[in-house]
Image (cartoon, rainbow, N blue to C red):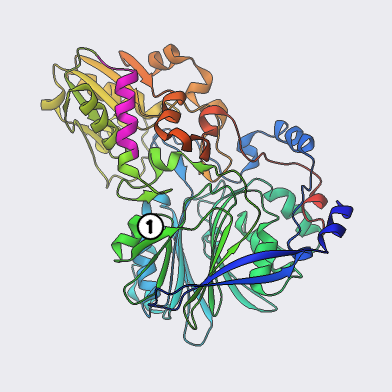
Amino acid sequence: MVAAAAAATSTSRLLFHRHAASGSDRHHQHQLRYPATQYLISLRCGSSRREAAAGALLPDRVTPFSYGVDEEADDHPREECGLVGVVGDPDASSLCYLGLQKLQHRGEEGAGIVAVGGDGKLKSVTGLGLVADVFGDPSRLASLPGPAAIGHVRYSTAGAAASLRNVQPFLAGYRFGQVAVAHNGNLVNYQALRNKLEARGSIFNTSSDTEVILHLIATSLSRPLLARVCDACERLAGAYSLLFLTADKMFAVRDPHGFRPLVMGRLRNGAVVFASETCALDLIDATYEREVSPGEVVVVDRRDMSVASACLVPHRPRRSCVFEHIYFALPNSVVFSHAVHERRTAFGRALAEESPAPGADVVIPVPDSGFYAALGFARASGLEFQQGLIRWHYSGRSFIQPTQAIRDLAVKLKLAPVRGVIAGKSVVVVDDSLVRGTTSSKIVRLLRDAGAREVHMRIASPPVVGSCLYGIDTPSEGELISNRMDLEGVRREIGSDTLAFLSLGKLHGIYGDEAEDYCDACFSRKYPVLPTLADPAAELEE
């Protein structure tokens, strides 16, 4: 590696920048050169060492996130975070607040906004709870004036459900000023990086992997800040979509594999907006422009609203998370350049072709995420489509039910059957995914109690057999029902008359030539980036 570094010093790395003035359609290409030693990319651990480390580490021990054991919770994986950034609008923090409201589904247990005022100082407001709870007091939002802001919503992590310290964006000061960061994803080399940083004297205030990124920026010897950001990100392994905010710039960064989504848009006044999903752009009347490309850094200078685009690292195979289309994203979003509702309709249509339900009378979705898959299934099958289950959105989490009978009643509060649609009929129930099986078994009981003659469960994704390492809160593999049982065992466990999943091959067929661009490790156990337990010194080797 030393020899490789020496060879690299004779070359330079090109960063291609695109400049656009606010409100202008004219773009100019620039090339900036930085010493290659600042951007040296090398395999700090051999592949055999990384694979051995991965084999020694269970996925639920790699990530700082844990699914928990609340059996009454919704039986889906949970997205960890949602991001919004606005630069160039005097009401930036208010627009971030609205965008975070639209991204509430991506994180419901904590929210925050960091804004830069006219004096160039960054100020933070964070809190536990929903966005409306955190900013329910109008004075909190009013305390964040300024033309640029970033916001974040999150789910809590293991052992930190009540910890305000872990709520982002994180705001820190270092010798060149203030910097704030908001992160969606998960770093699979987090612990190795943290161990090394702590050995060098870094002090951590949180249990979040995001804090590592701030320490890497602060300790980098590169200049300017763009070089520090690139230097830090090149040391990261795993999934990260990031927003950074300083006194005069905003940086949007996406990992080289593009695991998590991040899009860019513009307001009519020329302000630039970044968000995890396009639904947030739609809400604030921002026009969608494009994705932040995998491995790209987009820099917006709020002083002249110039926009620069830099290549973070050499090309790597794209591996966008397929579960964004299956479950996480809202159906009115465009994610990875595809309309989410169209993808889900296609999943349902393919499921009907592959696993029809002859003799069924009606198709119903499991609300809300199963709606479009059920619609596609019904259309392809020529069956009636009905809303046979009504979700009650205001019940909260069910914590203190002392008996099973009371817990079953609590389930009926969350999901209520429409008896006129179900009674006496053979019902096809379509859900987006089946993880632990707890919710599916309750739904089958609800439908039978409501008079369903038959219940045919159809799942518009393959069986989940692997935990996610890249920012999705999934159970350990031992809790995944399809990892413990075969198809017939799962069917008996949930109590349906029949059960079928969309096959992995059929899922790939829907994406066609793009299939290899998506991460399906939760279905295939083929992890694009392996976790590492290598010597932490190798992770930060100069």
Residue of label 1: 130
Residue 158 placement, left or right of 145 = right
Q: Three-letter amino acid code at disc 1?
A: Leu
Q: Residues within 10 Å of mark 1 (few under 14, many from 20)?
A: many
Q: Is residue 211 above or below residue 332?
A: below
Q: Residue furthest left?
A: 420
| Front one among 296 and 209 | 296
Quadrant housing residue 414: top left
Does the image show residue 132?
Answer: no
Q: Secondary structure at mark 1?
A: loop
Residue 525 position in % (x across, y down): 58, 29
| Front one among 165 and 251 | 251
What's the residue at 44%, 26% (across, down)? 462
Residue 38: within the magenta?
Answer: no
Residue 182 position in % (x across, y down): 53, 62
Q: Residue furthest bottom?
A: 119
What's the residue at 14%, 20% (across, down)? 423
Q: Quadrant of the C terminus?
A: bottom right
Q: Is residue 85 above or below residue 484?
A: below
Residue 12 placement, left or right of 302 = right
Does the image show residue 190?
Answer: yes
| Front one among 439 and 120 | 120
Q: Is residue 519 above or below residue 290?
A: above
What is the number of callouts on the image? Answer: 1
Residue 232 position in % (x across, y down): 68, 61
Quadrant housing residue 377: top left
Residue 367 position in % (x across, y down): 27, 37
Residue 348: within the magenta?
Answer: yes
